[in-house]
Amino acid sequence: MDKNTLVGFLLIGAVIIGFGIYNSPNQEEIARAEHYQDSIQKVIKEQEVKQKLAQEKAEKKALELDSTSLFFNSLKGENKIYTLKNEFVEVSISNKGGRVCKAMLNDYKDQKKQPLVLFDGDDASLNIGFEGKNENIMSSQLFFKATNVTDSTVTMRLDAANGGHIDFDYKLIPNSYIVNFTVKAEGMQNVFSPSVKTMNIDWKQRARQMEKGYTFEQQYTSLTYKPVDESFDNLDKAKNDKETISEVLDWVAFKNQYFSCVFMAEKNFEKATLESNMEQKGSGYMKSYHADMQTAFDPTGTQPSNFQFYFGPNHFKTLLASNELSLTGEDQELEDLVYLGWPIIRWINRWFTINLFDWLSSWGLNMGIVILLMTIIVKVLVLPTTWKSFLSSAKMRALKPYVDKINKKYPNQEDALKKQQETMALYSQYGVSPMGGCLPMLLQTPVFMALFFFVPNAIELRQQSFLWADDLSAYDDLISWSTSIPLLGNHLSLFCLLFSAATIINQIVMMKQQNMGDNPQMAAMKWMMYVMPVMFFFIFNEYASGLSYYYFISSLIGILTTWIMYRMTDEKALLAQLEANKKKPSEMKQSSLLSRLEALQKEQERIQKERQERMNKK
């Protein structure tokens, strides 16, 4: 491994550090939020009380003013709940507004080991608005009557004074997390203008904090949406954000790290205004979401408006299977809710990492052992490129005495070009490529980066313990304290400490490989190689312990592999082989890289010579 290899490692580290910093919240904001947490919560509660009083006042006023309304008899009623359930999910429907008021997942637990509730009560609201000739109809203000009630179906009917009605039909699909939802008007033709072709949907939800680590979960919690015939997108995860979307949408998702509530429309959503606001740490919530949009509505009742809800886990294959239940018959690409990285990395995760993980998990092993086996398998698969990189570094070390002679021959800066030319000529004579150690390592990068994206999104690691870590999807806080320290928080992740220490050891091994010693040109690089693990620690301290554990194991295996290869390599025999190659130049194939470098050097030498001649003429 040569200087270029180290540069490659630094670039890889820079990508990881940059990604971590980009996704990390502002520390000043965190400190300020914690400092004013009590007062902020007090203000929030006061605002909630004011909003509730204002809403009650508005509803009371509606009762007083709307006595001539077609739905006057629906303005009063007793709140009743109807539950639809299958083996996976329980969905509660309220007759007030005819909406889904609660979703509970049977196979998942919250942090108190109770069945996980995605939302309940005032956490969420859904108002469907219809523009009538004489009055606007707001579903959230009205009481519906329940009919066709079974364990998997219910029809919420809104009766009108003219004998017509609007039905909200709900059907929970067996063996799924999907709820089919239909809106249909009967006998309401005279209530709406013939020009009415749409209805308005106002959907809100406060996303609960589901996981142990607020900061880490916040990075993966976002309002996500998918435009028709395009890839998914999301609002800003790190700050308050509001956008008016010009594209027509297949679906909108209120997403947590591991769970999502998705609203899909057969005729799509349009004119959508989406909003996401940050919730304060300690409030029990991550973000508050709001989607205001329109969709097709036929007031004659000939064509019902069909929708689907998904209330379930962000599990790749579960979401993939849910696509097959789509009302449109088209792929909804719900699996995009599990972010697996950039295109090539996503491809590796989808077709390799997930299948390997599922295969190992099917053995019933602890998830820590699964990660260990995955790491070993990945290391074995990339071993040929690792060996090629190591062998290239060994050749560079063998030629180092010759390179040192060239450096002594040209100590002055003005001779840098000549020194470079002779060095490249030396490599060419012995058939060694200075990039031979870097390129194989770069080829490995997508595989290692794939696991960087996969582990934080693997719901299978959620609440799975290993050694001292009680949850591999969150930080392990074996060492913790009450006061939050800037850049560090209130804990030390032991796996993160081990990962950082192993990285430092790995860097030392690499430097010894390079025989960097007292080389002043490498001083800055050596300094950076020690700084990187420290930066890793501050970034990964809040990350999933499963990810730090993976990198720790990967570093240990890397150190062991390097030591074994070093013991297997006879550098004297390698130098003898290089000397033999030098005596057979006709049998040696010069790399295209060396050829390009030599051509570039000749061109530089020509330009420098012409410049010198022009200066002499002056």
Image (cartoon, rainbow, N blue to C red):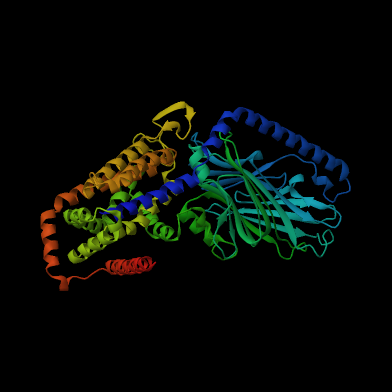
Of residue 419 and residue 53, the one placed in the foreground of this image is 419
In the picture, measured across the screen, residue 180 lies left or right of residue 388, that is right
On screen, residue 138 above or below 597: above
Residue 366 shows in the view: no
Residue 594 shows in the view: yes
Of residue 510 and residue 108, the one placed in the foreground of this image is 510
**Residue drawn at the location 54% of the way across and 35% of the way down:** 28
| The quarter of the displayed image where residue 597 is located | bottom left
| The quarter of the displayed image where residue 405 is located | bottom left
In the picture, measured across the screen, residue 481 lies left or right of residue 409, that is right
In the picture, measured across the screen, residue 225 lies left or right of residue 468, that is right
**Residue drawn at the location 75% of the way across and 53% of the way down:** 129
Of residue 449 and residue 213, the one placed in the foreground of this image is 449
Find residue 93 and report its horizontal and vertical position in percent.
Answer: 65, 46
Find residue 464 and report its horizontal and vertical position in percent.
Answer: 40, 40
Of residue 598 and residue 556, the one placed in the foreground of this image is 598
**Residue drawn at the location 37% of the way across and 52% of the way down:** 12
On screen, residue 437 above or below 493: below
Find residue 117 and report its horizontal and vertical position in percent.
Answer: 56, 41
